[in-house]
Each structure stands twice: as structure tokens, then as C-alpha cells.
Amino acid sequence: MAKPLREGAKLMVPMDHLRPTQITIGAYHVAQKIHVTRRLSHADLPPFLDKHRVHVVLGPEHTLYVVDHHHWVRAWHEMGMEMVPAHVREDLSHLSQRKFWAYMVDNHMVHPYDEQGRRQPIKALPPDIHAMRDDPYRSLEAFVQLSGGIARSRQPTRISAGPTSSAGTSKGHSTPITALPPRWPARYSSR
């Protein structure tokens, strides 16, 4: 039996050993992270990478699952990096697959939602970082979050049209807000 990794351990891991815990990423957000990384000088890159370590959980069969910074790891993948800095959140390699995924779901460490906002079974998670699909609303969510518009949450984000008064209208608007545009995914509705 392998010695467990301690929480907080810092590692350099091969990109192709990482498994995502979400189905989608925002391609625009990834492009922004590529831009940020490319602007760094050679001397500034190591401390920057150390500050933005990918958070991983060691799962059954010693598989490394990314639980935070999927956009950074995808950006670095697209830049051709073969090794990425990682921070071990937990070593759960002693758990069975069933108990591992139950723990991941219970602790909000997996986000199995597709680009339509529909929850998918765990088996729908991509096999590698490259296979994560684009969801433009993930970029929108990230940029709104970065600008201070919404707080980071463990739950799927729901964007509403604003606080409503007792009459059911958005403050400052005279008509009730009853629905979002037809192509807006259900996970962003205010209901």
C-alpha cells in the first residue's frame, strides 16, 4: 500500500495524469488565462505557477482529480505545458469508487453539469483536461465573479435579473420579470 500524501503537499504532476471533476470550462476564460500567463517574464513564471497551483484530490487507484483551477490547467495544457504545479487537498485513495464519488458529491468537489446546465451522471465526466467542453456561460460567470458581481459559490450559479419587490417586479422596472431569453440555460434562471 502506498504511503498517503499529506494534505497541503505541493507536487509537480504530469498534465496527462490529471482528471477533471467538471464537464465544462469557459473557453474565453481559458483564453484570458493563457494571455495572463504568456505576459509573464521567465523569472516571474515560477512564483506565479506556485501561487496558482491546481488543487487535486488523490482518488482510487491513485488517480489525481482536479477540484479547483480547471481553467488554469486547461490554459496551461493549451500552451503545451507538460508538468503543472499541484496542491493536494485530500488523499482519498483508500476509498472505493462508490464511496469516493459519494464523498466528492457531498463535499461539492464535483460539478457534473453539461453546457446546457443539466446535471449528468459522474460517468459523463471527461477522461482528461483536453476533453472538457466549452460552456460560454462559464466564462460569463467567471468574469462577473471577478468583477465582484457575484460571490463564489459551491452551488451551480443562478443569475437573476435583480432583487424583486413584493409586487414581483425587479426594482426600477415596471414589468415583472417572468423568463429569461429562450436560449439562456435553466441553471441561470431566477426561479
Image: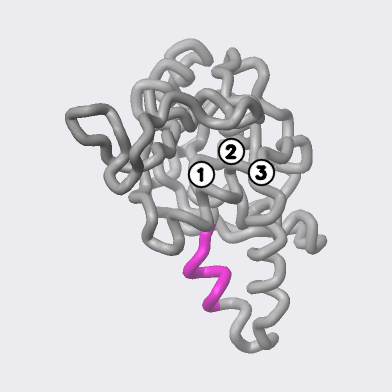
Residue situated in front as seen by the camera: 139 or 67: 139
- In terms of secondary structure, where does tag 2 sit? strand
Instruction: Please rate how many residues cluster around mark 1, counting C-alpha atoms within 10 Å: few if below 14, some from 14 to 19, many from 20.
Output: many
Residue 36 sits in quarter: bottom right
Marks 2/1: CA–CA distance: 6 Å
Residue identifier under label 2? 64
Marks 2/3: CA–CA distance: 26 Å
Which amino acid type corresponds to the residue marked 2 in the rendered image? Leu
Dominant secondary structure of the residues highlighted in magenta in the image: helix
Magenta part of the chain: 47-53
Q: Position of residue 180 (x, y in %)?
A: 52, 30
Q: Where's the C terminus, which quadrant?
A: top left
Question: Residue visible at 62% across and 36% down?
Answer: 20
Residue identifier under label 3? 136
- In terms of secondary structure, where does tag 3 sit? helix
47 left or right of 132? Answer: left
Instruction: Please rate how many residues cluster around mark 3, counting C-alpha atoms within 10 Å: few if below 14, some from 14 to 19, many from 20.
Output: some
Q: Is residue 124 above or below residue 142?
A: above
Does 87 lie within the magenta span?
A: no
Residue identifier under label 1? 56
Q: Which mark is residue 169?
A: none
Does 52 lie within the magenta span?
A: yes
Marks 3/1: CA–CA distance: 24 Å
**Nearer the viewer's eye, disc 2 or disc 3?**
3
Q: Is residue 160 above or below residue 48?
A: above
Q: Position of residue 83 (x, y in %)?
A: 70, 59
Which amino acid type corresponds to the residue marked 1 in the rendered image? Val
